[in-house]
Amino acid sequence: MLIFGTRPEATKMCPVIQELKRHAEWFDTKVILTGQHREQLHQALAHFDIKPDADLNLMKENQSLAYITSAAIAGLDELIAQERPDLILIHGDTQTAVCGGMAAFFHKIPVGHIEAGLRSHNKYSPWPEEINRKIVDVVSDLMFAPTSLSKDNLLRDGYEEHHIYVTGQTAVDAALLTYDAQYDFHEDGLKPILNQQGRIITVTAHRKENVGVPMQNMFRAIRRIADEHPDVAVVYPVHLSPTVRETAYSMLSDHDRIHLLDPIDYPDMINLLARSYLILSDSGGLQEEAPVFNKPLILMRDTTERPEAVAANAVYLTGTEESAIHAVATRLLTDQALYAAMSNAINPFGDGLASQRIVHIIARHFGFVSELPAQFGVK
């Protein structure tokens, strides 16, 4: 049973689901949604041709963390009691992941945690994800760490090595499956922008801990960058959060080269990244996706749970101060040597085979195969 509830979880889980379904002789695969997100989640599933077996459909306006947690645990408890799966797979650090892990634990059902071991070492940044992922790791039996560093985090926390497997990041699998050099964008507003001469900067900003002054700083920097570089067009699919949208539209909406769009679907986003010159974001997942296409990413956050990307020189961690964001973006737009160094960085997150490794490890866990696959990045 695979349990998830947000678009990022869906895009990272769908390649695993596809691989599990290729081995129907071993696995009866059930896909369960909590409905923590709705429209964008179902768009992602449709892209990968995945149909859920059940949907708790929990999403409501202005939902709180407490509401999602209590409602998801109650709903999942009932489903798990009915199905009694042999293994429950959860992903990452969302409220759905916590609830899936806890509900599985209540029923003494083994848990596989895809994307185990990420740490920022600051419990409020990212919030609530840093604590969520620790909770999920505590109840997990199979820990699928995307990198050697995430494995090291788990070992440092006291987990036994024979429970930990370095697989690579399934986000890389999903991005490679989705990219199309001849892609036809679904969002009509993107087509004229991409057909223009000049460089595209893609922006995303939505993190809860950045709401308020940090986000205002970010948007001031973005506006300055657009003002100072007439060949640049900024594309920002604005998150549906009312607070984020109010700030974004009040600060960025009246600029002829800053294009504020409604959220775009996953295939559009991946193919937009591939066609961008530079990415500015406070996202977790984009840190994994940008290196797939050799696109430098300016990370507008104070911490990252993915320091591999910073160490590989694929991501530049600036914090949220206007001056720092503006300075780094200006350098990347004007210094060809720096841009080349970042755009040629080796992707530290995967090779497109993470889903195959995960399914092979699960098959070995149940005795269908005798050998483990070679781990990602481990000589």
Image: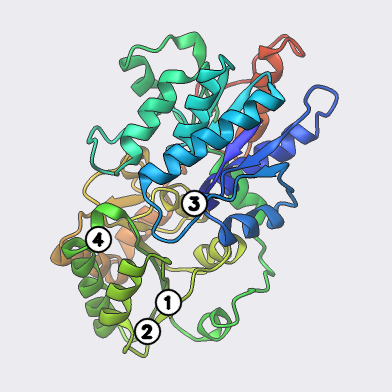
Mark 2–mark 1 CB contact (< 8 Å): yes
Which mark's residue is nearer the viewer, 2 or 4?
A: 4
Amino acid carrying label 4: it is Val
Instruction: Please name the residue that numbered disc 2 is placed on.
Output: 231
How would you rate the neighbour count of disc 2 (Cα within 10 Å): few for under 14, some for 14-19, many for 20 or more?
A: few
Quadrant of the image containing the N terminus: top right
Side (left or right) of 244 relative to 164: left
Mark 4–mark 1 CB contact (< 8 Å): no
Q: Say what secondary structure mark 2 lies in.
A: loop
Nearest to N terminus: mark 3 or mark 2? 2
Residue 120, position in %: x, y?
Answer: 28, 36
Q: How far is the residue under mark 1 from the one under mark 3?
A: 19 Å
Nearest to N terminus: mark 2 or mark 1? 1
Examine the image and state in which quarter residue 311 appears: top left
How would you rate the neighbour count of disc 4 (Cα within 10 Å): few for under 14, some for 14-19, many for 20 or more?
A: some
Instruction: Please name the residue that numbered disc 1 is placed on.
Output: 199
Which mark's residue is nearer the viewer, 1 or 3?
A: 3
Side (left or right) of 355 relative to 207: right
Nearest to N terminus: mark 4 or mark 1? 1
Q: Say what secondary structure mark 3 lies in.
A: helix
Q: How far is the residue under mark 4 from the one under mark 1?
A: 28 Å
Residue 178, position in %: x, y?
Answer: 65, 56
Mark 1–mark 3 CB contact (< 8 Å): no
The answer to whether one can see residue 6 in this image is: yes
Q: What numbered label is drawn on residue 289? A: 3
Instruction: Please name the residue that numbered disc 4 is placed on.
Output: 211
Q: Say what secondary structure mark 1 lies in.
A: strand
